[in-house]
Image: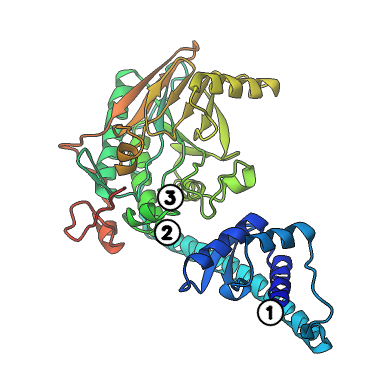
Amino acid sequence: MNREEVLQALQDFKEVSGISRDKCIDIYNQFKASDEIYSVRVLVSGNTVEVKREYFWNYINTTDIREVYSTGYTKISKDQEFETEMTKLRQEKLRSSDKLRFERNAFNKNLRELNALEDLNKELIESIKKLPKNIKQNKKVILDTNSGVGVVVISDTHFNELIDTPTNKYDFEIASKRLRKLALTAIEHFKKNDVNKVVITLLGDLLNSDRRQSEYMNMATNRSKAMVLAFYLLRQFIQELSENFYLTVASVTGNESRVVGEDFDTSDELATYNYDYTIHQFLKLYFEDNDMVQFIDGNFGEKIVNINGQNVLLTHGVALKNDLEKSVSQMFGRYGMNGVNVDYLFCGHLHSARIGDTCSRCGSLCGSNSYSEGALNLNSRASQLIGIFYNNNSRNIMNVDLQNTDNINGYDIIEELESYNAKSVNKKNKFLVHNI
């Protein structure tokens, strides 16, 4: 092909693909870097598009790309042979076939995602149906509206993350022990303070992201299977507390548990396109016949829950900046402008516990990992929050250290772990990923 044909092909590629100029230049540089690259994949308007090398011959350069994208057309000589009617027809045919290929690839991608989600839901439904629904209750709880209302804050459990560092170990078995330790500590603390009603808040990131390669390699099992195992753990936690207290479960979604895509959207619709939301709904399905447990739906991006007369804002914490108190005051002001007074806020996200007068940040169940220690120079411990809200507008929040679980019998998921072949820090065939 001569230069004019190449420029025309590039113009056709621009019109069909919708790829921006900068991304086109980036693709060009990838092909220039290696002659062995035949095609690359790029993200365009949320869809993955495969770009072949044939659009980027050695006859063009970045200047030509900028000219095509800035002028909207290329100046092609009328005297060239390719301007014949036959060539025009071939160009139109090529343009149509390319457009169909791009549309077909995008459509197939959406179908694959839909099929995967449908299979996942079927697996979860079958797993829930197999579980016995014998509601065991030690005694009838007498509700006292004058006593304090307990709160258990669970955030950033990252159930499918596999951590093996000199300072921290984490897999599903360790997660089950830490979650059980939280339950035992909360039950003891609430009983000592005559609490008979408890709010369980799930603040998101129940599963770990698998979008980046290091995350994918450090997964204990894939996220579809991890959802089932996470459900097993959380339903046993809720069951144990329901034998002693009236429970209300409220959830918001996190950024790591979103189903697909690089961007985290806080809209109501896309906030539910999240594994945290799905786990909440299946827990709700399991406990639908339990009079001791109720679930709150509504907005899963942020949620206001009135706990013993105090309006408590639940959020994962992505929108909160380094100056936590200032960010919290701004959020309180936003709600105040809409006629809702907020008394307190719970968040997570940073895997580091912090308790304050107007807000508390929950730590993580998994604790520190190689990234936080090696790349961010942060060293945290596994922890979660519990507290009591009183009807005189006072509250007491405390951090529960869960790092060590000696002599703690975890929840029963051994059979499920084996059936799903989940990786463990105790398995000899495990491998480590070293961050450089």
Looking at the rendering, in which quadrant would you find the N terminus?
A: bottom right
Q: Is residue 121 positioned above or below 134 on the image?
A: below
The disc labelled 3 sits on which kind of residue?
Answer: Ser
Most distant residue in the top direction: 392
Where is residue 399 drawn, in percent x and y?
33, 24
Q: Which residue is mark 3?
A: 209
Q: What residue sits 54% from the left and 22% below the top?
A: 328
Mark closer to the observer (1, 3): 1
Question: Please, what is the three-letter code of the amino acid marked with disc 2?
Answer: Ser
Q: Name the one closer to the observer, 145 or 278.
A: 278
Q: Position of residue 56 (x, y in %)?
A: 61, 71
Pick the front one: 120 or 213? 213
Q: Is residue 81 above or below residue 197?
A: below
N-term mark: 1 or 2: 1
Q: CA distance from mark 1 to mark 2?
A: 51 Å
Q: Is residue 287 visible?
A: yes
Q: Quickly name the residue at label 1.
A: 2
For this view, does 64 lie left or right of residue 82?
left
Looking at the rendering, which quadrant does residue 74 occupy?
bottom right
Sequence order check, earlier mark of 1 and 3: 1
Nearer to me, 340 or 135: 340
Indicate the quadrant where residue 329 lies.
Answer: top right
Q: Identify which amino acid the numbered label 1 is placed on.
A: Asn
